[in-house]
Image: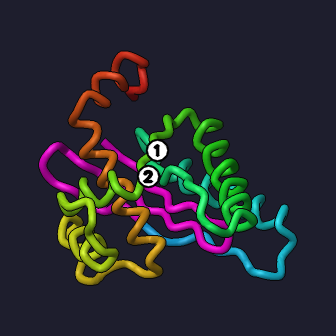
Amino acid sequence: MVVLGIDPGYAIVGWGVISFNGVNYAPLGFGAVTTEQNTDFNLRLERIYDEVDLIIKKSKPDAMAIERLYFQNNQKTAINVAQARGVIILASQKNNVPVFEYTPLQVKMAITGYGRAKKPQIMEMTRRLLKLPVVPEPDDTADALAMAITHTQAAGTNLKAMIFRKGYTK
């Protein structure tokens, strides 16, 4: 199974592609799509779409795992992230890649087994699971890899049966 994990944003979109054979993980690629602060927001969205579309075309994932959006105190930021998330999901849809959403709590549980794990713990476990020499930077990239790992954990549950029933196999 090849999974593209995404940590959505509009300044930085973390991404990570992993393969999982049921036992071992292998990182296939990871990085971040960045946009400049003073760039027109519509152009930022276009860049995000184009870059994610290219990542999908190159990596040919079986699924995309993305963080479920939740509103924080700053609604303007949340709305902008939601728009960026929308173009990311559109890129996945246009490439026939099913999208699965996970909450931060689900990621913490999948990666560390502890729902109150702190970010450094999640990042270190992600590094260990993927056998990387260092934690990927920026943090958004490590978060995206954790999101992809979370999907592989969920795919071993009832979610896997749902995937096959809906025909999301390649």
Q: Indicate the position of residue 167 as horizontal and vertical percent values.
A: 42, 19
Sequence-wise, the earlier of marks 1 and 2 is 2
Residue at horizontal 44 percent and vertical 77 percent from the top: 139
Mark 1: few/some/many CA within 10 Å (<14, 14-19, 20+)? some
65, above or below 55, in the image: above
Residue 63's tag is: none
- Work out which quarter of the rendered image holds the N terminus and state it: top left
Residue 116 is one of the magenta-drawn residues: no
Q: Indicate the position of residue 127 as horizontal and vertical percent values.
A: 25, 73
Amino acid tagged 1: Glu
Query: In the figure, residue 42 lies in which quadrant?
Result: bottom right
Q: Which residues make up the magenta segment?
A: 1-29
Mark 2: few/some/many CA within 10 Å (<14, 14-19, 20+)? many
Q: Nearer the viewer, residue 55 or 145?
A: 145
Q: CA distance from mark 1 to mark 2?
A: 12 Å
Asked whether, in this view, residue 62 is left or right of residue 117, the answer is: right
Q: Nearer the viewer, residue 118 or 23?
A: 118
Residue 4's tag is: 2
Residue 101's tag is: 1
Asked whether, in this view, residue 62 is left or right of residue 80, the answer is: left
Please tell me whether mark 2 sits on a helix, a strand or a loop: strand
What's the magenta bit mostly, secondary-structure-wise? strand
Residue 23 is one of the magenta-drawn residues: yes
Q: How is the image coloured?
A: rainbow
